[in-house]
Image (spheres, grey):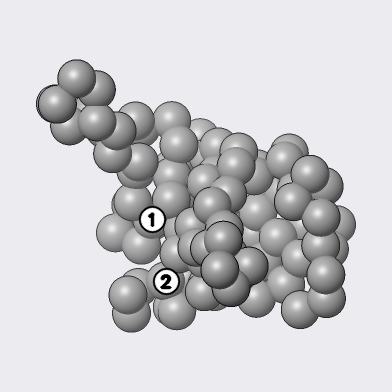
């Protein structure tokens, strides 16, 4: 994958490798040592696709776990391409 500015990613469409639109980029986490994508956070297009393959974000609010159904998390190693859109391979994501 070529170099991509993180600031260019918000609001890009996120598609599965088979072409289904999953949503748009909300945010991402990057390993500060390696610079690799750790997690892609996606604002899903309703309805949320493949709940078994994509997990909602868990937040810790005052010591209590809370599920945010509006944001989904995809493993960074599932990102296969970044251009006008972000392509993810959900079969890689499922192996984690």
x then y, percent, for residue 92: 45, 79
x then y, percent, for residue 59: 29, 33
Residue displayed at 70% across by 60% down = 86
Residue displayed at 53% across by 63% down = 31
* Quadrant in the rendering for residue 83: bottom right
Label 2: state its secondary structure: helix
Left or right position of 6 against 20: right
Q: Quadrant of the N terminus?
A: bottom right
Q: Quadrant of the C terminus?
A: bottom left
User: Mark 1 = which residue?
Assistant: 54
- Label total for image: 2
Above or below for 64 versus 85: above
Label 1: state its secondary structure: loop
Instruction: Pick whichever of labels 2 and 1 is earlier in the sequence.
Output: 1
User: Mark 2 = which residue?
Assistant: 93
Front residue of 92/48: it is 92
Left or right position of 69 against 67: right
Front residue of 15/60: it is 60
Above or below for 34 versus 51: below
Residue displayed at 49% across by 57% down = 39
Above or below for 42 versus 94: above
x then y, percent, for residue 27: 60, 42
Q: Does residue 88 show up? A: no
Q: Gap in Å between the C-alphas at discs 2 and 1?
A: 8 Å
Contact (CB < 8 A) between labels 2 and 1? yes
């Amino acid at each position: 994958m070529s170099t991509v500015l993180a600031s260019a990613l918000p609001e890009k469409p996120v598609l599965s490798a088979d072409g289904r639109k999953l949503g748009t980029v909300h945010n991402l986490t990057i390993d500060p040592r390696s610079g690799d994508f750790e997690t892609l956070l996606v604002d899903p297009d309703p309805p949320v696709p493949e709940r078994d393959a994509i997990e909602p974000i868990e937040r810790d609010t005052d010591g209590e776990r809370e599920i945010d159904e509006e944001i989904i998390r995809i493993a960074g190693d599932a990102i296969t391409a970044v251009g006008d859109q972000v392509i993810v391979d959900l079969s890689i994501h499922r192996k984690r």
